[in-house]
Amino acid sequence: MYRWRKGGRFGLAHPSQVNLVNALRSIFLFTLAFLWHLSPVEAGHKEFIAASPLPQYTQECAACHIAYPPAFLSVDSWLRIMAGLSQHFGVDASLEPDQIKLIGRWLASEGGTYKKVQASPPHDRISRSNWFLREHRRVDPDVWLLPSVKSPAQCNACHTHAERGRFNERELRPPPGMTGGFR
């Protein structure tokens, strides 16, 4: 490593200065890598697994549909959904008060906080959120009506690893009855 030396001459830096610069460079690169790792959703990554999945959430919610990753909706949306379980999208999904409190607290801690979910979708439906509609814009509307799909809420009809929070496009499969491929 070169630098200006006393007397106005350009020459090799002292080895201790080279070590300091290399250490600072390493710290900087490590910090960048660490911060990149902390925000997979914002980086466009398609894995939305919660840090520690709540078994009660999976057990109760996955009885009717996949246990959606909490990052798919804002905390406000999740809290409204939990407050209205007696009319949960046309179904009575009531739970015991202690279960509501436990699941609600977990959803509040794991709910999406990034830009894509800040605006709550109409009726707090994931399938009506702007990001969902943008991601599925090439899906023919007839696909949602297939008996093997039934609705946009059935992620696992096409996403082979939806239960694990993985929605990678390379892991898509056409659902039974779909003619052609994805547009």
Image (cartoon, grey):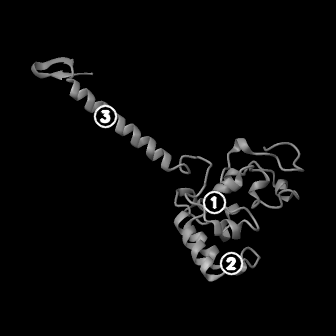
Q: Tell me what residue is drawn at x 71 percent, y 75 percent.
A: 88
- Whichever of labels 1 and 3 marks the residue nearer the N terminus, that label is 3
- Whichever of labels 3 and 2 marks the residue nearer the N terminus, that label is 3
Which amino acid lies under the numbered mark 2 shown in the image of this protein?
A: Leu
Q: How far apart are marks 1 and 3 (CA)?
A: 39 Å
Q: Residue 23 carries which label?
A: 3
Which amino acid lies under the numbered mark 1 shown in the image of this protein?
A: Pro
- Of circles 1 and 3, the one toward us is 3
How many residues crowd mark 3 within 10 Å: few (<14), some (14–19), many (20+)?
A: few
176, above or below 154, in the image: above
Figure label count: 3
Name the residue carrying label 1. Answer: 69
Local secondary structure at mark 3: helix
Q: Can you say which quadrant of the picture contains the N terminus?
A: top left
> What percent of the width, then of the height, locates residue 158?
78, 50
How many residues crowd mark 2 within 10 Å: few (<14), some (14–19), many (20+)?
A: some
Residue 135 horizontal side relative to residue 43, left or right: right
> What percent of the width, then of the height, locates residue 9?
15, 17
Q: Tell me what residue is drawn at x 58 percent, y 46 percent.
A: 44
Q: Which mark is residue 85?
A: 2
Q: How far apart are marks 2 and 1 (CA)?
A: 18 Å
Residue 151 horizontal side relative to residue 40, left or right: right
For residue 182, what is the image quadrant?
Answer: top right
18, above or below 139, in the image: above
Which amino acid lies under the numbered mark 3 shown in the image of this protein?
A: Ala
For residue 82, what is the image quadrant?
Answer: bottom right
Local secondary structure at mark 1: loop
Q: Tell me what residue is drawn at x 80 percent, y 61 percent.
A: 151
